[in-house]
Image: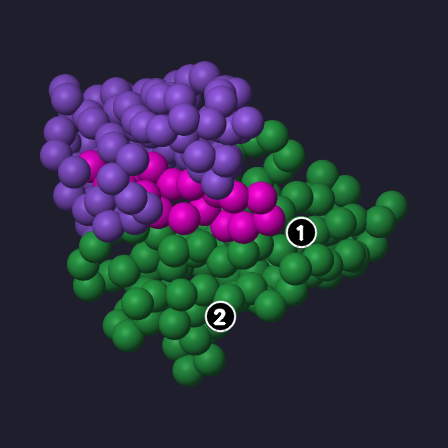
Chain colours: A purple, B green
Amino acid sequence: GAGVSQTPSNKVTEKGKYVELRCDPISGHTALYWYRQSLGQGPEFLIYFQGTGAADDSGLPNDRFFAVRPEGSVSTLKIQRTERGDSAVYLCASSKGPLNSYNEQFFGPGTRLTVL
Amino acid sequence: AQSVTQPDIHITVSEGASLELRCNYSYGATPYLFWYVQSPGQGLQLLLKYFSGDTLVQGIKGFEAEFKRSQSSFNLRKPSVHWSDAAEYFCAVGAGGGGNKLTFGTGTQLKVEL
């Protein structure tokens, strides 16, 4: 079956611009996660959705970052006034349910964001 | 707060040799533990997982890992490495008592010499 998909695969933007990154989870998965992976590091948690609501957004670094999942399926990560430090690979993951119900997370291929 | 340490940044092994990648975690309660593999330009693929029960878990591609609570470790092993195993390996811990995020280590880059 189809896995998690993310678009675009690469995004180059200029400092100060606005970007949107899209994630299509595995069909039927109610939980969706965003992580950010900087060069040479492991992924870092940004936000977790259960259904349409953000159940945990404690990893968002500041108020320039925002994510939505209006219909409980596709999610969009939005970054305003991008900075060079935002350059990273943004990973999306989905699971059948929450982690604490023994559900593993399946990751997409990521979107590589480069801010010039 | 939960954390993961992967003490080896790079490891080189010969094809056919055995492999052990180290992972130590910090978490107050029973953790959920995972190993993922990432090949260049690819997403993370789950190798194996531990939620509860048998502390020796089997995964895909011939990998296994053992949860040792007394040592706060979840080391990944493979008896005979193949050249295609060259990749970056990440250990991750999830909060069993609540919360749903994964906390990852910084990864171990595995090189396989032919």
Q: Is residue B58 magenta?
A: no
x 43%, y 75%: residue: B72
Up-down relation of residue B72 to residue A51 (above or below): below
Q: Position of residue B46 (x, y in %)?
A: 47, 43
Q: Is residue A34 magenta?
A: yes
Pointer 2 residue: B24
Q: Which of A26 and B66 is in front in this view?
A: A26
Pointer 1 residue: B109
x 34%, y 66%: residue: B2
Q: Where is residue A105 in the image (x, y as percent from the top left)?
A: 35, 41
Name the element at disc 2.
strand
Q: Is the Cβ of the residue at disc 1 closer than 8 Å to that at disc 2?
A: no
Q: Residue A37 carries which label?
A: none
Up-down relation of residue B66 to residue A91 (above or below): below
x 33%, y 71%: residue: B27
Residue type (three-letter) at the residue carrying disc 1: Gln
Q: Where is residue B83 in the image (x, y as percent from the top left)?
A: 77, 42
Q: In this view, does B15 lie to the left or right of A46?
A: right
Q: How crowded is mark 2: few (under 14 residues within 10 Å), some or many (20 or more)?
A: many
Q: How crowded is mark 1: few (under 14 residues within 10 Å), some or many (20 or more)?
A: many
The answer to whether one can see residue B112 in this image is yes
Name the element at disc 1.
strand
> To which quarter of the image does residue A49 belong?
top left
> To which quarter of the image does residue B51 belong?
bottom left
Up-down relation of residue B86 to residue B4 (above or below): above
Mark before the other along the chain sequence, 1 or 2: 2
Q: Position of residue B67 (x, y in %)?
A: 44, 69
Residue type (three-letter) at the residue carrying disc 2: Asn
Region rendered in magenta: A33-49
Query: Which quadrant is home to the C terminus of chain A?
Result: top right
